[in-house]
Each structure stands twice: as structure tokens, then as C-alpha cells.
Image: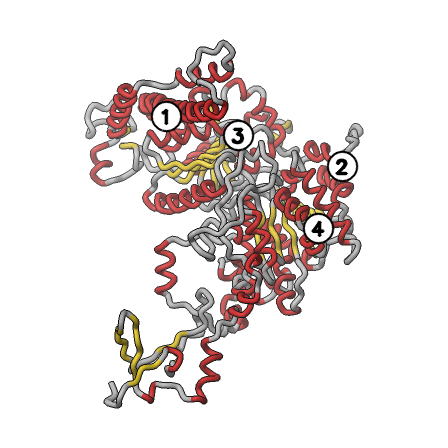
Amino acid sequence: MSDNKKVQVNWDQLKWNSVPVSDALDDFGGFYGLEEIDGVDVNIVNGQAQLFTTDKHIKNENDTEDSEKLTADPFEQDEKSNDEDVNPYGEDELIEFKNMDEMSEGELSSADDSDNEFGDEFDEEEKLILGDKPQTETEKKDELAANVFNADLNLEDVISSSELPEWEKIGNLSMTVLQGLSKLGFVKPTEIQAKTIPLGLEGHDIMGKASTGSGKTLAYGIPILEKLVESQNTKNKDPIGLIFTPTRELAQQVSQHLQKITELILHEKNKYAILSLTGGLSIQKQERLLKYDGSGKIIIATPGRFLELIEKNSDLLERFCKIDTLVLDEADRLLQDGHFDEFEKIIKLLRSHRKKTKSQYWQTMIFSATFSIDLFNKLGSVTRQKKKNEKEDELQLVLKHLMTKIHFRSKPIIIDTNPESKISSQIKEALIECAPLERDLFVYYFITMYPGTTLVFCNAIESVKKLNAYLNQLKINTYQIHSPMTQKNRLKNLEKFKEKASFNSKINKATVLIASDVAARGLDIPQIEHVIHYHLPRTADVYIHRSGRTARASNEGVAVVLCSPQESVGPLRKLRKLLASDDVKVKSKGKKMKWQKTISLLPIESDILAQLKDRSTLASELADNEIATNSLHKDDNWLAKAAEDLGIDVDSDDENKDVYLAKNKTKKMNKTISKDQAKFDRMKLNELLTIPLRKDRRQKYLTGGLVNLADHLVKKRGHNGIIGHEKTDALSTLKNKKRKK
């Protein structure tokens, strides 16, 4: 420290020195460098911090101009000049929504637009609008510890070291996109990507069909991202692409996927260039985000919310009619039920305004894993009857219907990378025949025999809740997703499931996600080893999409169907015939293979199943009691509140009481048990769960029999949960069974 006399100064009078940052480091949160100062004392005077230093650490007049350039916030002026109502950093609560089957996507949000106590920063739920994944505290600490700050990045040097020759073959891709692909580990394109991207870059209309998990998002996404990169160079502010998805989760997943590819150019002022617009989140926030400069160049939306936005605001309609590309992801679902009515209104509105500014048409790309003529026939006013012996390609028939509704710029090029097998060859299918009331038991059996990451699909929401409670009683890590849940809770459960599955996979422990068909479409959940169809799906395309949640990318997986004997002679038979390829034949006889031979029976070990029955019975009784008790409590609260509002006595003996409510209450009461009985059953179940399962219970001693069970225990060999059983998995079991045949 200098002996010169020190004087009091302000922080902006000091000579700050730049701290060098490595060029290899990336940007962190908008910081572009660090500065430091030494030789300064800090004294507390009257509760205020005051700075004291010598003359040599104080700036002179020549330093002032440079210092102001260093300390100025490059975005401060823009933020100050914006109207407060336009600021995208407003704060609203996440909106809860009703059952998606009962509520149209375009139903107006009832949330207000007021500020809250948390100030103007985005909270974790609001980041869902932008497609950002909330950070954990550990991730935040790790990111800060890494000390990564933005530096001038030579993209050519980076990409030359990564070398992506397979991607370079399919088109002249920008350095930004190639760098994003390299960072995410996409070394080479999939078949659908290799065939689609060159045509997409040339501006062709495309109809693409590929199996689930084959990379359809990047197949249509990369041509759009290339236009985004080009617009950054040309300063073009017109929107580029509009992508429609049938579900909210899929819209957010697609937006996250595209943001990761182009994160090198999506920072600060243009970080809102890619936005997801879905129901379940505040429409006021989405409107503010769309007003932000440079936002909404690429929109991923559900039809209902997008229609609601453009009907409320004609400026948005004028803006989005200028798009270059329109995409329908999971088109078969988008063009059925109520979705198509909303989509048709959107197309008419965009086209009517587009005539004033641009050509009437835009590039259109539609993608799905399934295109069924039975489904698309519903779109036409007149169903064409096929003549006898006429063998016209099904995709061509579907395309004819679509061309009357969507109005393509030119006849789309059909790209079909999965013409024969409708289920990916990487998925091994299996069947478990069981009585309807034994479904829970056989799910428990499968999870016990083959611990891993399992996704169970149910047709009914009540079944989702019951199975979740049942497996929780058996101490199995389970999470549930269904449409009546708020979007916040659905996404929270998804994140918890992914984190738990990642941890449990290292110790060979089961993790289960139980879902309705809201999770069947497009969601890319990593490391799903098994899919269980708790109920037989209602249509073949739902079965394909459900099963496609496993065997993603180049992995293999197992899809198991639980089916009663009655279903096997009716619905299952019809399903297998629809899924079977026309050229599947028995070589020896030259006849078509019987439907029963297109799916294998999963081997069931009766001695293990017998040991699980008592546990299953108790768990089922406790689960029924838990659900019925909670439901009765909610019903009573609702009834009491309704009676209070109407000013009547809910306990009066009114002869006109609702018969349906009375029957429903009796039905629930029959599933409840006393508190003492519940406590006793829980103690008994916990006691049973402490008893280890054994491969062969006929052995009296652990050291007896053909298998030395004691040796297995001491050396920790074989199956984690069953003493004396060899370590196995469902995929290997099915493969070995096929070889033996």
C-alpha cells in the first residue's frame, strides 16, 4: 500500500484494469469481461461504505471516455425507451387449465396482468414460455464456478476441429448450425434428415413419414434455422417459420431443441427469436414477448392459443402472414378432432392477409409417424370408394385429401422412410395375457423382474391415479402425468422423473412414469427402456406413438401389452392385423402369418408371481382407500361450499337429493377402510416388503438345491431384487426366446 495521502473517491473515479479471459470460454449471462482494482481502502462511515485511495489509482480526464464505453450497459437505453407495458419481463402466475379433452385450446386465459412481489425478473415457470429449462442450485453454482464469459469466437476454427462431413454432404449448412449440431453430439444425419433437409433448403413442399424417434424435428427444423441465420445477417425482421404441434409439452420440447442448435446467435436482444406459444401460460406475457424487438422469428405453437392471439390482435395477424415456412408436426393428430377446425381458421386468416403483402402461398412441410387413410378420409366431404383390385398408395390418397384443405404451393414431395413396418424394428413387442383385475399385479411383476426406466400408458385418468398410488405403496419411485394436471405440475413431474431415472439407472433400480395419452405424442424422454400398455390403445396410431417413446435414436426398447383373453380375440386381433406388413409371410407355406405370431408372449415365472400376490392385494386395498378418502373429502368440501353459496342446509333430509351424487358417494365409501385397518394393512405390507424374494422357495436352506443362494447373497451376484435369480432384462429375455424358436 502506498504511503501517499489517500483521498475519498467514488467507484467510477477509479482506474479499473481489465482481466484477460480465455478465448475458449463462452458467454455467461451477458458478461463480456471482468475488471479489477487494487490499492483501495473501504471504510464504513455512518453506516455507508466509502472508498479511499491515492492519486495514482484515480482516473484522469483522458481515461473518462474509454471508461464510459467499458461500463455502459449496451442494452440499457433500449430497455429504458420501451414502454412499461411492452416490457417482456412482467410477472404473472401460471394459469391452471382444465382437462384438455373438455377445454378448447383457444379458451381465453383468465389471468390478470398485474405485477407481483418478485419484481421484473422471469421466474422458473414463466421461462416455460421461452422454452428454458429451470436451473437447479447445483447447476447455477457449477456454471458460476466455471467462470465462462463471452469472447470473440472463431467459428471456422471451432468447426474445423469437430469435422462433420456427413452433415456437409447434405447441404451448405451455416457454421452456426454445424457448431450447434457438433455441440449436441449429432455426428451424422438420420435417414429422414438426410432426405428432407436438402429439399427443405431448396424450398420444396414436403410430406414426411418416419418412425418415432428418427429425428423429424431437425428434419424440418434445420431448413428453418438456416433462414433464421440468414435473417440475422440481412437484418430482416419478418417472421420466418410457424410450427404447429398438437400438445403443449411437444411445443416446448421443439422450441428447446431449436434454441440449443442456434444458441450461439440467440443471446441478449435476439434470445426471444424462437418462442413457444401454448395454453396453460399467461396470454398477456406471451403478447408482451411478441412485442419485444427481434422476438418471434420462429413460433412453435398449439393451434388454439395461436388462433386466440391473432384474433385478439390484428397487428400479429399482419405480422405472421409474412412467414416463409409452415410446419405441421404430428400432422395426423393435428388434423383430427377439434384441432383441424382451429387450424383451418388460422390458414384462412393468414392467407386473406397475405394476399395484400406477399404471394399467396408459403413453403409447407407436414410430418408424422403415421398417415392413415381411415383417419384422413374424415377430412373430405366425400369419401372416395376404392375400386376392386385398385392398389393406390395410401400416402397418395392422404395427400389428395390434404391438398384440398391446406393449399400447398406445389405438389409436395413424399418422403417415406418407414414404408412397411409401422413399429420401429428396434422395438421388441411382447404380450402378457391376464384378467382385467390383475393388471396392477402384472405391472408390479414386470417392474420387479426387469427394473429400469418404464413408461406406463393408461386409457383412463382414474387408472393413472390408482396405479400411481398402488406402486407408491410398494415403495417404487413413480410419477404421474395426465391432462387435468396443471402444466406446471406436469413439467415438474417430467423433470423429477428424468432426474430420478438418471440416478436409479446407475444402481439398477426401477423408476416409473404413469401417463395418459398426453405423453404419447412426440415427447423425447431419454433412456426409456420399457413401455407398458396398461390398457389396449383405442387406435393403431396411438399404439405406434406410445411404443415410440422407447427405442429413441439408435437405442433398442421393449413394448409390452397387457391384454385380457376377451380382448385378444377382438380388439388385439384387429390391432395386430393393422400393424402387420402386407408382405409378412410364413416361408414354409407361403401364407400370411397369423396375427398371434406377430407378437411374443412374455415368459412369466409363476413362483415369483405367487410371492408378489399378497403384497399386491394389500397395496391395492390401501391405494383404493387413499384415493376414495381424498375424493370424498374434496366432494364434501365442494358440497359444503355450494350449500353455503345457495343458503341451504346440506344435511337436511331432502327427498329431492341428487341420486347420482348419492350413488357415487356410496361407491367411494365401499372402497374405504377404517383407520385402524389401514394402519394394520400398512404394517403388514411393510413387513412383507422386507422379506426378500427367492428364485426357488422349495429350497429349505439357502445353501441347498442346485443354486447356492447364500453364495449369491454374499457375493452380490445375480438379480438385485430376487435371490438366486440370474441378472436379466426384458430385451434379452425376448431375444433369447426368439432364438430358441
- Which residue occupies 59% across, 25% down? 594
Q: Nearer the viewer, residue 383 or 192?
A: 383
Give the answer, above or below, for where 520 lies relative to 170.
Answer: above
- Amino acid bearing label 4: Thr
Residue 605: image x %, image y %?
Answer: 37, 26
- Which residue occupies 29% across, 81% down? 52
Q: Nearer the viewer, residue 668 or 632?
A: 632
Q: Nearer the viewer, residue 504 or 133?
A: 133
Q: Nearer the viewer, residue 276 or 422?
A: 276
How far, Cα to Cα, is label 4 from label 3?
A: 38 Å
Can residue 522 be seen at all in this image of the molecule? no
Looking at the image, the residue that sits furthest to the top is: 655
Q: Earlier in the sequence, mark 4 or mark 3?
A: 4
How far, Cα to Cα, is label 3 from label 1?
A: 37 Å
How far, Cα to Cα, is label 1 from label 4?
A: 50 Å
Task: Name the quadrant containing residue 3.
Answer: bottom left
- Which residue occupies 72% across, 42% down? 345
Please name the residue that numbered disc 1 is placed on.
626
Q: Secondary structure at mark 1?
A: helix
Please name the residue that numbered disc 3 is placed on.
599
Residue 391 lies left or right of residue 291; in this view the side is right
Please name the residue that numbered disc 2 is placed on.
392
Residue 88: image x %, image y %?
Answer: 54, 57
Q: Quadrant of the N terminus?
A: bottom left
Q: Earlier in the sequence, mark 2 or mark 1?
A: 2
Q: Nearer the viewer, mark 2 or mark 1?
A: 1
Q: Nearer the viewer, mark 4 or mark 3?
A: 4
Q: Earlier in the sequence, mark 3 or mark 1?
A: 3
Please name the residue that numbered disc 4 is placed on.
364
Residue 386: image x %, image y %?
Answer: 78, 30
Q: Judge the density around disc 2: few (<14), some (14-19), many (≥20) Cα neighbours within 10 Å.
A: few
Q: Judge the density around disc 4: few (<14), some (14-19), many (≥20) Cα neighbours within 10 Å.
A: many
